Image (cartoon, rainbow, N blue to C red):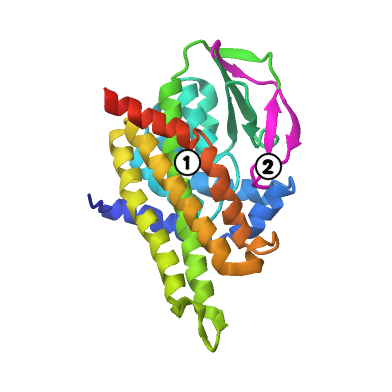
Amino acid sequence: MRFLLDPEQRAFTDSLGAMLTAADTPSVVRDWSRGDHASGRALWARIAEAGVFALAVPEAYDGVGLRPVELALAFVELGRHAVPGPLVENVAAAVLLGGCGLVKPLASGETLATVAPDGRYALDGDAAGVRLVLTPQGLFLSPGHGPVRPSLDPARRLTALEPGGELLTREPPVDDALALARLTTAAQALGVGLALLDRTVAHVRRRTQFGVPVGSFQAVKHRLADARIALDFARPLVLGAALTMAAPDIAAAKLTACEAAHTTARTALQLHGAIGYTAEYDLSLWLTKARALRTSWGTPDECRATVLDGDRR
């Protein structure tokens, strides 16, 4: 199936992409990884001003209502530019909070929210103003967080949230929040994969061996073609899932997009050679994110199980 964006959607993604390109996100990511959130919060405010977070917030709380397709398009751009922060968790929190007044500052970017599913580690709990703990007993507002723990992706700062906070609701819309979290994770992974492919293509055009660009070698072309096909196959699944919002469709989109990004990351690392392994080189900001997103909000096995369960029905 071929998906075509309408003029408003194209203008939205183009303006968001232009803003992120001008924001020098690699330096923002490195600041965030060190625990310096100033530049990241400034970028977060600009993303909110562009209307990204309002796409998951009800109109009664200064949002525009849930717009999954536009959210998916926005998260592709956020992934393409490796924007740090609890982006997925913020929109998942907006769904979990529903009609709670805490959701209003999420749309404006005034507050960042993060979520710890089943009491596990939460992303960027040290930067978030709203920390939610999701347990079988309900949704709780955590009073604080523990120390930051290292992560495969340095920009994904994991924290344990303190228990014993206020009970917000005993019946939060867990399935709806999980669906949106998986969809936006898939879109973010797709953007990461596209950025890795673009950077790798540019690299093999510049790098020469035996007097010719490395990109002219047949083996290199095959690796890049495989990565491009995987990403091109993932895109309609992500947009199709955004239209249906069916759990099996979303799980298939997340599995496909994350595997495509992971495959592209491996190709990028191989074709960049030794420089790809250095943390100082900007490529690493996307490499580590591709690996981390692969298991975020559902491992490949969990997503496969959801798809198979849907097929049995």
**Farthest residue, direction left:** 1
Residue placed at 58% from the left, 21% from the top? 118
Residue 213: % across, % down: 50, 82
Q: In the rendered image, which residue does mark 1 sit on? A: 185
Residue placed at 48% from the left, 34% from the top? 91
**Farthest residue, direction right:** 147
Residue placed at 43% from the left, 66% from the top? 224
Q: Residues within 10 Å of mark 2 (few under 14, many from 20)?
A: few
**Amino acid type of the residue that numbered disc 1 sits on in the rendered structure:** Thr
- The stretch in magenta equals 136-161
- Label disc, if present, on residue 213 of the rendered structure: none
Between 64 and 123, the one nearer to me in the picture = 123
- Label disc, if present, on residue 151 of the rendered structure: 2
Between disc 2 and disc 1, the foreground one is 2
252 relative position to 45: left or right: left
Residue placed at 49% from the left, 31% from the top? 92
Q: Residues within 10 Å of mark 1 (few under 14, many from 20)?
A: many
The answer to whether residue 106 is seen in the rendering is yes
Residue 274: % across, % down: 66, 67
Query: Which element is circle 1 on?
Result: helix
Relative to 142, residue 187 above or below? below
Q: Quadrant of residue 256?
A: top left
**Does the magenta run of residues contain 153?**
yes
Q: Quadrant of residue 281?
A: bottom right
Query: Which element is circle 2 on?
Result: loop
Q: Quadrant of residue 7?
A: bottom left
**Amino acid type of the residue that numbered disc 2 sits on in the rendered structure:** Ser
Residue 93: % across, % down: 51, 28
